[in-house]
Structures are given as C-alpha cells and as structure tokens.
Amino acid sequence: MLKHLLISVIGHASGLSDGQLEQIEQSLPATKALIDLLNKAHPIIEHARGLYDEAEPLIDQARKEWQTVGPAAQILLDVISHHLDKGSSPAEAAEAVRAALGGSIGSIKNVAPDRAIDAGMNRVTVFGGTGFVGRRIVRHLSDSIAMVRVASRHPARAERDNVEQIVADAHDERSIEAAVAGADGVVNAISLYAEHGGDTFHSVHVEAAAGIARVARRAGVKRFVHLSGIGADAASPSPYIRNRGEGEAAVQAAFPGAVIIRPAVMFAPDDAFLTTILGLLRTLPAYPLFGDGRTRLQPVYVDDVAAAIAQVLRQAQKPYPIYELAGPRVYSYGELLRTIARSAGLRPVLVRIPFAFWDAAAGLAEFLPHPPLTRNQVELMQIDTTASDSRPGFGLLGISPRSLEQELEAMVKQTNEETQNAKETRTS
C-alpha cells in the first residue's frame, strides 16, 4: 500500500508513465528494498500509534507519581553513593537501601546519620521539646543527630546521652540566645490551646515564635522549623486561628527560609483526641456531634509528623517553605466517630448539637485547670482541616503516613488487655 502510494505521488508530480517509473524502480534496488520494508512496517507503526494513544494518560499519571516519589528515590541514590564512597561493598550499600525501604525515612537509624552529616546538622535545639509533639521530635532527632537540646520552662529528665535538657523562657531573649548557642538547627514546637495569665495566643504564637526565629537567625542557625497547623489563617475572625497565621508570617519575616510545618489534627495512644472520643463513646448513651457532623478532617499520626520534621532538618536539599502533613484518609466528623466506634465494637447514637452550645460549654470549661474542651477547638471544628493538593507533604519527604485504623486497632487491643487484667486482679 505504501509502495504504490509513493509511486503514484512521484508519477503525479513528475509526469512519468508507469512503465518509466518501473524502470527507475528496478535501477534503484536499495530504494525498492526500503520501500518494501516500510510497507511491511506500516501495520506495526499503526499498531504502535494505537498503543501510544493508550499509554499517553498513563504517562501523565506516572509523571505525577514520580513528582511525589522522586525525592525519596533521590535519597536512596544518595545513600548508595555515600556508602560506596566510604568503601562499602555494593552488597552493603544495597542492605542500607533495603533498610530504608523497610520503614519511614524519618525513623531509619542506619541511614539517617548519613543524611545528618550531609545537611551539617550536629546540634539541634527544640523549643517545646517536652510537649506532645516536641518529645517525639526529640526522639527522632536523637537517633541521628550528635546532640539534641531540649529547651523548656519545665525540663524533664533526659532519657538519652545525646539529649540535653535546659531551662528556657521563650519570652526572654537572653534565655533564647543561650538555648540556640552553637545550634545548627532550631525547631519551635511551642503551642498554646487555652489562654491563661500572660500566655495569650498572640504572645506565644506570634511574639515568642518571632523572637525565637529572630535570635536563631542572628546566631547563624542553618535551618529553622516552625510548627503551626492546617487551617492557620491571618484573616480569620478566630483569635486562635488568626494568631497561628500571623505567627507563620512573623517567623518567615524574622528568619527568611524558615520552614512551616502544618499538621492536621494529630492522634496517638496518649493524645487528648482519640482517647477522649473512645472513652466517651464507651460511656455515653448518645454521643453529641459538633454541628451536623459534616466538618472534614484528615487525622495524622503524631510520630509521622515528628519524623517529617526530623527529615526536613536532616535532608541536604533545600526544603520547601511550607509542608502540610495529613493522614491517608479524609473523614467527615460523623464518619470519624463511626470509624472509632466500629473499631471498639460499638454502635453509638449520634446527636447533633449546635456550635453555639459548644462554644458556651467550652467557655465554661476553660475556667478549669485542665479544660477538656476549649473555644479554639470548637472554632477549628467549624472549618475543614485537610491538606491542600497544591502543598508539599509526606510524599516529598519519603514518608508514608500511618492510617487511623491501624492505630485504633492497637489502642483497642491495649485497652481490652488492660480491662481484662484489671478484672483478673479484682477476682484474684
């Protein structure tokens, strides 16, 4: 088909007869053979074109996947290169990669030190390092950083030889200077969920955060990480949410290049989130919903957030300005409650309660020494706290976040074992 078409075109353009064209064809054996080969290849080419049409959407999808996993792959290549440069055998380098693939990059002990050396992180100061998130950040960092300094108003006992506990006041510049002296990296993990005394949302999330960032920059700190939260918005009418957003802007102004970490609502066995909900579901005949229960959440395991912060500090490549860290699934609040209840074998009755009632109840609860509910929590429950698709997250740090269901299963099992042990103790 192709051969005859080509001859026809040449004949039409040149005015030669078919006989003349055949004579020319016979005098050009290589050209004839090429035309014959193209004629045989024509159906294959047509088939390949069809395959490409099928492959095109897959190519686009694969490109998006590699935009996510590419940095993680680069980390593995860095690991291989580093081990080979140190004189390790290919088998030893491969073993290091297998170890990296076996868990979150943020928690790899045998690989992380190499990344720490590359990033030049030998000493890191963590403000708020005794808190819910802070103590986990300290633990992840101490696996790979030579010295981790925990700066807090109420220091705890150091559990590791390379962890130093010091007294520090985030509102006092000299105290901050002493805490960051000699540090290569600084993390601000100080949070306030209920105002009391001189500690207001503005004084903690804006003034103190900016002060720490300013002193860190002046001290020559290489990398600064500030813990915020998804939903932070400087234009919000809520004081808590607004000051979170203003704090981000103040930190970035005081320390250009600072990294903002915005986690979704965090959970863990010792949190005030899952454990409270699970306990109430087990004891209340009907569970009160925030509003209509349609607010969307994307809960994230707190250890994954800590691992991500440690990775941001360790990695040699320049981090992004903002990371939003959330779990693998988005729930409505009602779906979340049913998921938690189902894990414990419960079938709760859910009752809708207007937000106005919750706000009044939280206002009263804040008079208690340890309020079970605060007005800022009620405000957060009125907005969706899910990660933006346009922001970098766990994927660019090589971390796969754990699911809520996985942790729930472990929590329920542990609770059941404790209940059974208590029964056996009473009957013995």
Image (cartoon, grey):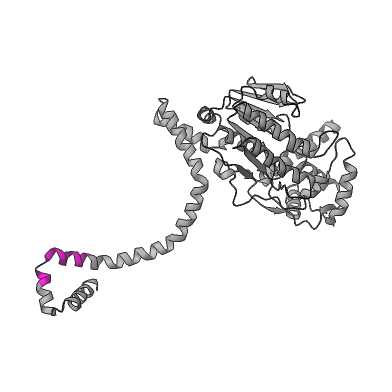
* Location of residue 362 by image quarter: top right
Q: Quadrant of residue 321?
A: top right
Which quadrant is home to the N terminus? bottom left
Res 295 seen here? yes
Quadrant (top left, top right, bottom left, bottom right) of the C terminus: top right
* Residue at image point 78% right, 56% down: 293
Q: Nearer the viewer, residue 209 or 84?
A: 209
Q: Is residue 148 above or below residue 352?
A: above
Residue 28 in magenta stretch: yes
In the displayed structure, does residue 288 sit left or right of residue 222? right
- Write the residue at 68% across / 24% down: 177
Read off the magenta span: 24-37
Q: Left or right: where does residue 113 sit relative to residue 219? A: left
x then y, percent, for residue 176: 70, 26
Horizontal side of residue 48 vs 107, given as left or right: left
Residue closest to the eye, 240 or 397: 240
Q: Please name the predominant secondary structure of the magenta segment in the image.
A: helix
